[in-house]
Image (cartoon, coloured by chain):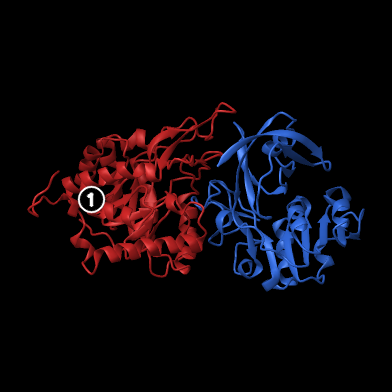
């Protein structure tokens, strides 16, 4: 297994959030405590994604989005990644395709720019007439394994298999680990879900349904993190409703070694978002009180006598 | 969040431009924007021209529908979003085309404003009579029908304590070197998707226009290599401004 790069602080953005290298550079310049940045998922060919509205945020903690993987072509992504370099932070390139060979083709182009490749197996969004990646690949252990195997052949960088919470994710993870994944991403947005406007009697999102993120996602992906760590004891990049240092510590105790922030950046300027990352990292450090983080990863699995596992 | 209001009036301002009034006033800072939602059609950013209205130029399917709304029709609004203008003293408000509409609420909130307005024809100089009651109005039209024949930039510099510029990006880029950066603000526009700082779509050299802007000090705009040159389209692919 190839170890993950040293992502320090162990905080990153979630894929599809911030998205572009020039935004990462602006966050880095503003002093954000993100040790790595993940690109928007790079696809094989240009695709506009859904029309607006692409986001709904009812006042109950759930956020829905239905961007549906807009992307410029992989060639245009190459030009962008040539142009903007991060000073210190690591770059993770998220990749997707319609089948294993498209995933492989994108990985071939992106590998040289990346410190790790994140394989998007779980996007629950689609443009009208499409099938979601979650349905076509991410819920199927054999097809997911085929994708990971082909991606593995195209890169010498660590490969993160990012799973859907709406799948038999331990079975999918098992296939992915056997196929050469180095780490698990736990996980994508949930659902998809639906929001309806009662006055116009219409689905609000132009894509009708959208992946669920924010606080509503946290207990789900926390459980996925916990179960995946219990089974595989592998590095886990965790995402889902991390808004405070306490949220981050919960994920660390469940088994995460890198934490992804997404919806918590909502309505925050670059300066405010950078301050949030500093607060989260300071809170984690205070909690650690000098102990290395590695001592706490998965600590929630210890039984009363300090050995073994509940899982 | 997102609320649905009733349209109460549709006022034709010019051949291409309408002001659509709705049944509730929204408290916002001048320069902040609203995401206007037409169910089943789409959602796009506009700045309020009145506390209860947006002024819209027909430029595509969405704005055709928006400018055709009738009293009793419904309009969805999300906002106000983003950073507006700081309070401005004795400002010169420099507007081009439908960008002039954004200056109306700023003008009403400002002490002793003057106006520098440009358009292709006299018809495009929105709120001309109303602005003349608030302060001196300098006009440039490309066909010479009103004021100076030529571009709005040819009227600069004008003497003022602060400057706010809202118009087509190439016009704003031409204004940038003619105005004192530390006292000038620009209204930057980009294709928006989420409009709440998440998706990064509206990046201008790494600043997310929806949450870091849309109003930026000229000192920041001067650092934006993308300003006046390129922007990301719906897919993220670059296109020329």
Shade of chain A as shown in the rendered figure: red
> Label 1 marks which chain's residue?
A
- Which quarter of the rendering shows the C terminus of chain B? bottom right
Residue under the image location 34 percent in, 58 percent down? A245
Residue at the far top in the pictured view: A201
Callout 1: SS: helix
Residue under the image location 18 percent in, 61 percent down? A295
Residue A74, x across and y down, in percent: 45, 51
Q: In this view, does B132 lie above or below A88?
A: above
Residue carrying label 1: A254
Residue B40, x across and y down, in percent: 59, 31
Q: Is residue A102 above or below residue A11?
A: above
Residue under the image location 66 percent in, 45 percent down? B26
Left or right of B145, for residue A296: left
- Which quarter of the rendering shows the N terminus of chain B? top right
Residue A109, x across and y down, in percent: 39, 54
Query: Along the line of sight, which residue is nearer the eye, B241 or B196?
Result: B196
Query: Along the line of sight, which residue is nearer the eye, A156 or A21?
Result: A21
Q: Is residue B66 above or below residue B182?
A: above
Residue B135, x across and y down, in percent: 86, 61
Residue under the image location 85 percent in, 58 percent down? B134
Note whether residue B182 is visible: yes
Left or right of B224, for residue A224: left
Shade of chain B as shown in the rendered figure: blue
Using a 10 Å C-alpha cutoff, classify the residue at mark 1 as few (fewer than 14 neighbours), some (14 to 19) or many (20 or more).
many
């Amino acid at each position: 297994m190839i170890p993950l790069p040293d992502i320090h602080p162990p905080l990153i953005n979630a894929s599809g959030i911030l998205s572009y290298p020039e935004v990462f550079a602006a966050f880095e310049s503003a002093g954000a405590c993100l040790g790595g940045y993940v690109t928007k998922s790079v696809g094989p060919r240009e695709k506009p994604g859904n029309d607006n509205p692409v986001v709904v945020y009812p006042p109950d903690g759930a956020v829905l989005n239905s961007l549906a993987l807009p992307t410029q072509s992989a060639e245009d992504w190459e030009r962008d990644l040539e142009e903007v370099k991060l000073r210190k932070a690591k770059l993770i390139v998220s990749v997707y395709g319609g089948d294993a060979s498209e995933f492989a083709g994108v990985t071939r182009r992106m590998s040289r720019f990346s410190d790790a490749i994140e394989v998007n197996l779980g996007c629950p969004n689609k443009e009208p007439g499409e099938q979601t990646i979650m349905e076509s690949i991410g819920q199927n252990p054999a097809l997911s394994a085929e994708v990971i195997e082909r991606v593995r052949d195209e890169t010498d960088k660590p490969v993160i298999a990012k799973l859907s919470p709406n799948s038999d994710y331990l079975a999918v993870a098992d296939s992915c680990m056997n196929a050469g994944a180095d780490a698990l991403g736990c996980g994508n947005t949930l659902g998809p879900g639906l929001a309806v406007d009662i006055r116009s009697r219409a689905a609000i999102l132009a894509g009708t349904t959208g992946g669920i993120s924010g606080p509503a996602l946290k207990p789900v992906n926390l459980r996925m993190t916990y179960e995946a760590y219990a089974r595989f004891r592998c590095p886990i990049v965790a995402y889902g409703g991390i808004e405070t240092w306490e949220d981050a510590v919960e994920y660390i105790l469940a088994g995460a070694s890198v934490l992804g922030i997404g919806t918590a950046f909502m309505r925050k300027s670059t300066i405010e978002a950078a301050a949030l990352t500093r607060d989260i990292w300071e809170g984690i450090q205070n909690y650690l009180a000098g102990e290395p983080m590695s001592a706490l990863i998965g600590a929630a699995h210890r039984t009363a006598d300090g050995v073994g596992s509940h899982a | 969040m997102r609320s649905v209001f009733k349209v109460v009036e549709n006022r034709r301002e010019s051949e291409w431009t309408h002001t659509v009034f709705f049944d509730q006033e929204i408290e916002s800072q001048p320069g902040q924007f609203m995401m206007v939602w037409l169910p089943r059609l789409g959602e796009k950013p506009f700045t309020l021209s009145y506390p209860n209205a947006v002024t819209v130029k027909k430029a595509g399917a969405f704005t055709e529908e928006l400018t055709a709304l009738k009293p009793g029709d419904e309009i969805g609004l999300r906002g106000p979003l983003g950073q507006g203008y700081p309070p401005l003293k004795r400002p010169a408000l420099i507007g081009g085309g439908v960008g002039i509409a954004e200056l109306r609420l700023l003008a009403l909130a400002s002490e002793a404003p003057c106006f520098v307005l440009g358009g292709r024809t006299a018809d495009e100089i929105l709120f001309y009579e109303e602005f003349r009651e608030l302060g001196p109005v300098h006009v440039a039209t490309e066909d010479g029908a009103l004021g100076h024949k030529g571009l709005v930039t040819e009227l600069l510099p004008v003497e003022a304590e602060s400057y706010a510029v809202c118009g087509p990006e190439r016009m704003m880029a031409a204004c940038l070197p003619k105005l004192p950066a530390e006292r000038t603000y620009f209204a930057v526009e980009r294709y928006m998707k989420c409009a709440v700082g998440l998706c990064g779509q509206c990046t201008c050299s790494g600043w997310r226009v929806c949450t870091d802007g849309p109003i930026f000090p000229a000192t920041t705009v001067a650092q934006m290599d993308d300003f006046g040159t390129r922007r990301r389209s719906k897919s993220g692919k670059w296109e020329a401004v």
